[in-house]
Image: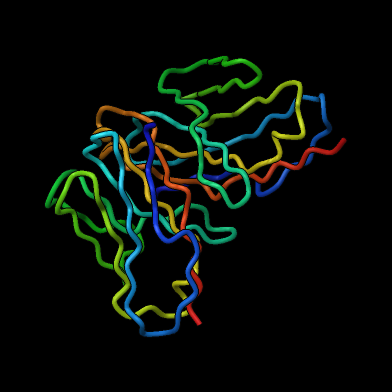
Amino acid sequence: GQNIDQPTEMTATEGAIVQINCTYQTSGFNGLFWYQQHAGEAPTFLSYNVLDGLEEKGRFSSFLSRSKGYSYLLLKELQMKDSASYLCAALDSNYQLIWGAGTKLIIKP
Amino acid sequence: EAQVTQNPRYLITVTGKKLTVTCSQNMNHEYMSWYRQDPGLGLRQIYYSMNVEVTDKGDVPEGYKVSRKEKRNFPLILESPSPNQTSLYFCASSPPPDRVHEQYFGPGTRLTVT
């Protein structure tokens, strides 16, 4: 079956760096998305990776290893406003999104 | 402004009383989708539509209906709501999935069925 695994919750300190991991098993693969979702709000797009490697976008970076079925989202210089859930979603061979349950990130001062 | 709108944003209803949640997008997107989100379960797809008059079941379609008569609108219908349909619902739209594009989400509808 198709499956996405990511930690349920993580805690980090303001100003620090945190890495949120995601492993996926899908029927075929057409890329991986990361979304941010603040409590009670809609998910918003952060990044998309389809090739191996690291893509940097300001304080946020996303990494993909297709051979390992693994991705991570790296958040640097954490700010209180980064407290949110981070959703990992893989695009399968039929271009259907398979969603993880999300990682709730708690930032402490 | 490019956006996906949903109405109502909050709804409390009783078991068995038919309801419709509207969804509209102004980006001329072909693909539209409905999700429900429950604690610990993430986003689960209810129905999706690849274009006008083309709809398909997602992972959890039981108890729901949809229609796609116009490109911009994709209403979600609960003919006989039950308490297990209490959830946070999101509508989303995008270009066709094989063009691999981000999805744009509406603000969500929080539904409570008593």
Where residue B102 appears, x then y in whole percent? 39, 32
For residue B2, above or below residue A96: above
Q: Please name the residue shown 40% across and 22% down the image.
A: A50
For residue B105, above or below residue B14: above
| Nearer the observer, B25 or A67 | B25
- Examine the image and state in which quarter residue B17 appears: bottom left
Taking the image as shown, residue A98 lies to the left or right of residue B61, namely right
| Nearer the observer, B34 or A1 | B34
Taking the image as shown, residue B56 lies to the left or right of residue B33, namely left
| Nearer the observer, A55 or B92 | B92
Where residue A8 appears, x then y in whole percent? 66, 49
The colour scheme used here is rainbow
Q: Residue furthest left?
A: B53
Where residue A62 appears, x then y in whole percent? 56, 23
Image quadrant occupied by the C terminus of chain A: top right
Q: Please name the residue shown 38% across and 47% down the image.
A: B5
Q: Residue furthest right?
A: A109
For residue A30, above or below residue A88: above
- Examine the image and state in which quarter residue A75 appears: top right
Where residue B90 appears, x then y in whole percent? 43, 53
Counting every numbered tag in the picture gives 0
Q: Please name the residue shown 48% across and 32% down the image.
A: A45
Q: Please name the residue shown 78% across and 38% down the image.
A: A107
For residue A41, above or below residue A61: below
